[in-house]
Image: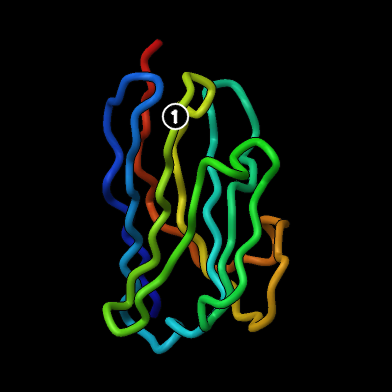
Amino acid sequence: QVQLVESGGGLVQAGGSLRLSCVISGRTITSAAMGWFRRAPGKDREFVGGISSGGDSTWYADSVKGRSTISRDNAKNTVYLQMDSLKPEDTAIYYCAATPLRGSGYYASRLYNYWGQGTQVTVSS
């Protein structure tokens, strides 16, 4: 079985930064592509960004491009989402997800088959 656990969420002021972490355990899927998604109040879940198995390729939603950076440390079985210049509209529950695919450019939720419990990010204005 695979377990994904997010952490690092919290309350920050607009313009601040957070680094979210996702720890992977239970199986050797650390080398798989990973993604971050979020669900804002009253809205559908949306893609935030993704990273390839080796960390050489990343891809982002337009809404966070230039403000967010995804990285991974496979030795620590951890994927990170660094978020800078946060805006109130970034307020959401953020989810880490894993896909068995080994390429890059995966945006759709249905391509990811393992999900974490989510961590709350709240950005005050």
Quarter holding the N terminus is: bottom left
Residue 78: x percent and y percent? 33, 70
Amino acid residing under circle 1: Leu
Does residue 112 appear left or right of residue 96 in this picture? right
Which type of secondary structure does the marked residue at label 1 adopt? Answer: loop
Which residue is identified by label 1? 86
Residue 42: x percent and y percent? 59, 21
Figure disc tally:
1
- In this picture, is 42 found above or below 80? above
The structure residue drawn at horizontal position 50% and vertical position 46%, both measured from the top left corner, is 68
Nearer to me, 9 or 56: 56
Res. 65 image quadrant: top right
The structure residue drawn at horizontal position 38% and vertical position 51%, both measured from the top left corner, is 117
- In this picture, is 31 found above or below 114? below
The structure residue drawn at horizontal position 30% and vertical position 84%, both measured from the top left corner, is 75
Residue 19: x percent and y percent? 33, 48
Residue 37: x percent and y percent? 55, 48
